[in-house]
Image (cartoon, rainbow, N blue to C red):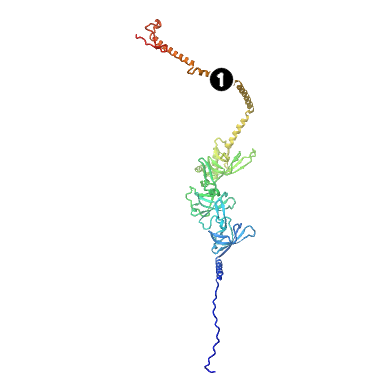
Amino acid sequence: MSDNTLPPSPPTRPQVKARKVRVSLVWLVPIVAALIGLSMVVHDFLNVGPKVVVSFLTAEGLEAKKTQVKYKNVVIGMVTDIELSDDRTHVLASIDLNQSAVPFTRADTQYWVVRPRIGAHGVTGVDTLLSGAFIGADAGNSEETKKDFTGLETPPAVTFGEKGKRFILHTDDLGSLDIGSPVYFRRIQVGQVVAYELAKDGKGVDVEIFVGAPNDQFVLDDSRFWNASGVDVTLGASGLKVSTQSMASILSGGIAFREPKYSPDAKPANGNAEFKLFEDQATALAPPDGEPKYIRMRFNQSLRGLVVNAPVDFLGVNVGRVVSVDLDYDAATGTFPGIVGAVIYPQRLGAANDKLKQQAGGGDDEEQTSRILGQFVERGLRAQVRTGNLLTGQLYVAMDFDPKAAKISYNAKARPLEIPTVPGSFDKLQEQLQQFVDKLGKIPLDDLAKNLNGSLIELQKTMKQVNSDVLPQMRGALQQAQKTLGTANEALSDDSPARQQLGQAMDEVQRTARSVRVLTDFLSRHPESLIRGRTGDAAPGSYKGSSSSREIAPEPAQ
């Protein structure tokens, strides 16, 4: 083999042609759907927040996987499950909150169901009629967190973050107040009632109110609060007065407050300050009453109409009120006198009380009051039950001076202080009426009735006789008189012969009177004619004219 021999060539490989891979458009739809689902899973994973369980009395309006949890109408979670509690007294709603809703796990967070509600304050939750009920939430400010909450049955009156102050009012009973009842200042609503509960001693009610900013600055440390519920109707000397804060206060109650005019140095009150809730405005704004004094009165009469809180007046000034009305038994007389207990406030007398204290001298306040009352009793101070309202029959106690009152011994050391009494004016009237009835009962009414009955019988007989005898005769006499008057009218008519004859007779009388006058004149001028007789020259006068008209001729000249 020579060196020029070429090495054998490597075996040739067959050529393979490249193929293009084609993807169908049909696969794009599931790929996009998978990407969207993956993004939603990632988004939900990133937004997963805490889980809480809220208990409600009922699951009305709630539905798992549909009911949302909202704060200021922003969705912050979803109800994932609803189940009964182990004791079957309430339901448990499991809620998945968003990652941004971590503050809603604070211990003082509040949850409630927003449903359509109709109440005295209006209609709320109308938007849930179409969208369905949802759970409202309000985060608190506590540093502690928890997972189990108790839901509210009604929405809270004040939400977290609202500026203002809360105050506590003490009252004897709640009346018509309720959560949401308005609070007024000068008839403008500035707050509302947010809570109430019984006092710790069970002798009253503590009402919590909230006054929003900036109106909370008007609540001073000497402000007076009163119940402004309903309508205040006052009938006095100036007429009928009707007062109310608003229509809402009439329906659902309300509270009003104002500072008294005699307290100019008051300062804004601090939050959670406590005040007394008075019954009406007049009592709330009245000057301070001072320390009360307890007195007792014994009445030997019925006290029907005298009730607790009835006023006690001294010379027309309200100085106290009745606190008790009880019965006692007097073994000596076998009667049941009424014992009335009352509290009086001497400070209501104003300057008169200061002068009386100076006059009473030293000693403690109780001894001064006893000495003052002792002096008044010696001057005739007596307590009397009087009628305050004729329509309702309500009574009140009036203390006044009676100069005719009998002298009694007053024990200044007795406690409680006792004021002597006199019968009421109405009882005196009853006694007078009873005396009148007794006198009336002594009158022989039976004998008077018999005599009156006999007189009536005789009068009836007389009337029958008059009707049967006298009246017909009187009727005939009247008819005869009527005929006589008719005849007289006919005789005196203008064209009657009697009337003409009467006229002629009157003419003759007139002529005769003239002749007599002429004769009298003649005799006065010629009196000698009575002796010598009538001569031709001294004739009384000749007549001229016809017989129907005669004139006296003048005398001849002398």
Where does label 1 land, which residue?
A: 479
User: On the rendered image, what quadrant is the N terminus found in?
Assistant: bottom right
The percent coordinates of residue 434 (x first, y second) are 61, 33
Identify the secondary structure beneath mark 1. Answer: helix
| Residue at the (62%, 59%) spot, across then down | 91
Q: Residue 188 versus residue 122: which sits nearer the camera?
A: 122
The percent coordinates of residue 380 (x first, y second) are 55, 37
Q: Disc count in the image?
A: 1
Q: Quadrant of residue 345?
A: top right
Q: Residue 522 versus residue 427: which sits nearer the camera?
A: 522
User: On the rendered image, what quadrant is the C terminus found in?
Assistant: top left
The percent coordinates of residue 29 (x first, y second) are 55, 69
Looking at the image, is 111 positioned above or below residue 512?
below
Q: Residue 129 versus residue 372: which sits nearer the camera?
A: 129
Q: Residues within 10 Å of mark 1 (few under 14, many from 20)?
A: few
Extreme residue toward the left, this view: 558
The percent coordinates of residue 442 (x first, y second) are 63, 29
Kind of residue at disc 1: Gln
Extreme residue toward the top, this view: 532
Looking at the image, is 167 positioned above or below residue 26?
above
Is residue 486 visible to the viewer in this orientation of the structure? yes
Q: Quadrant of residue 335?
A: top right
Is residue 111 visible to the viewer in this orientation of the structure? no
Q: Is residue 444 left or right of residue 552?
A: right
| Residue at the (61%, 43%) spot, across then down | 326
Looking at the image, is 396 positioned above or below residue 548?
below
